[in-house]
Amino acid sequence: MLIVLPPSEGKTRPADGPALDLDDLSFPRLNRTRDQLLRALVRLSGTRRAAEVLGLGPQQAEDVERNARLTEEPTAPAIEVYTGVLYGELGWHTLTPRGRERGRRQVTVCSALFGLVRAEDRIPAYRMSGSVTLPRLGTVGGRWKPVLPAARAEAPDGELVLDLRSGTYVNLGAAPEGAVTMRVLTEKDGRRTVVSHHNKATKGAVVRRLLDEGVEAKDAAELVAALRDLGWNVEPSGRGRIDVVV
């Protein structure tokens, strides 16, 4: 099973580590687009318009400065660079050794700058969301849509893809045929709603259990059954989507 996570907009800057080497990243067919976007982001971040184009405020000035020297910034495994509610609940460093080994094979992150990276691919802390339009290159989504689905198709035949991306990152490239998506709903007084915090926290907790328990589902029905066995209130909702009710 291949698990696709959204990135976090905020990131932890590595204290040390080697500089970025695109050739060391997984999914090498993405390197041409990675290089184009990286060069454009570095160039933009050295201008006065950077914060405006990237949708950042004065408090993120340091992030813009780091963007301008991304090719020299230290790198760390992606799973350590991305932070936030989902990644906190996943708790990479507190997974069992077997859980982390599965995560190295199964977890990927959909990134506005790098397309897809695996958990231990080394990347710098950068700041660019999937909704940005870069000078000369256009929208980030427009750059990834032609190439990202083909890279994701490198998963072995018959392997289920669990696509947990948020809407912005779904727009970077459609999920492959047969992929399963997940919606997290909260229920109160018979009414169900989507709440962002619960959505992220629950997805992180679900991925943690899938990795630690070694769940290997082949389709949505098997995944629903496995999650129910693990104590989740899960319902299939058609078209490859499942609902987790919390």
Image (spheres, rainbow, N blue to C red):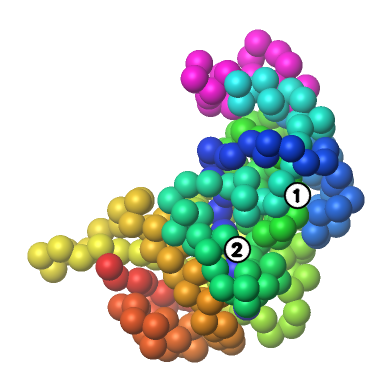
In this rendering, position of residue 14 left or right of residue 99: right
> Where is residue 163 drawn, in percent x and y?
55, 66
Q: Quadrant of residue 62?
A: top right
Q: Nearer the viewer, mark 2 or mark 1?
A: 1
Question: Badge 1 is on which residue?
Answer: 122
- The front one of 182 and 126 is 126
Image coords of residue 76 (percent x, y): 71, 46
Residue shown at the point (43%, 51%) measured from the top left: 85
Q: Which residue is mark 2?
A: 4
Q: Is residue 82 visible?
A: yes
Q: Residue furthest top?
A: 48
Q: Is residue 52 magenta?
A: yes
Q: Amino acid at mark 2?
A: Val
Range drawn in magenta: 42-61
Which of pointers 2 and 1 lies earlier in the amino acid sequence?
Answer: 2
User: For the residue marked with disc 1, what is the amino acid?
Assistant: Arg
- In this rendering, is residue 58 above or below 56? above
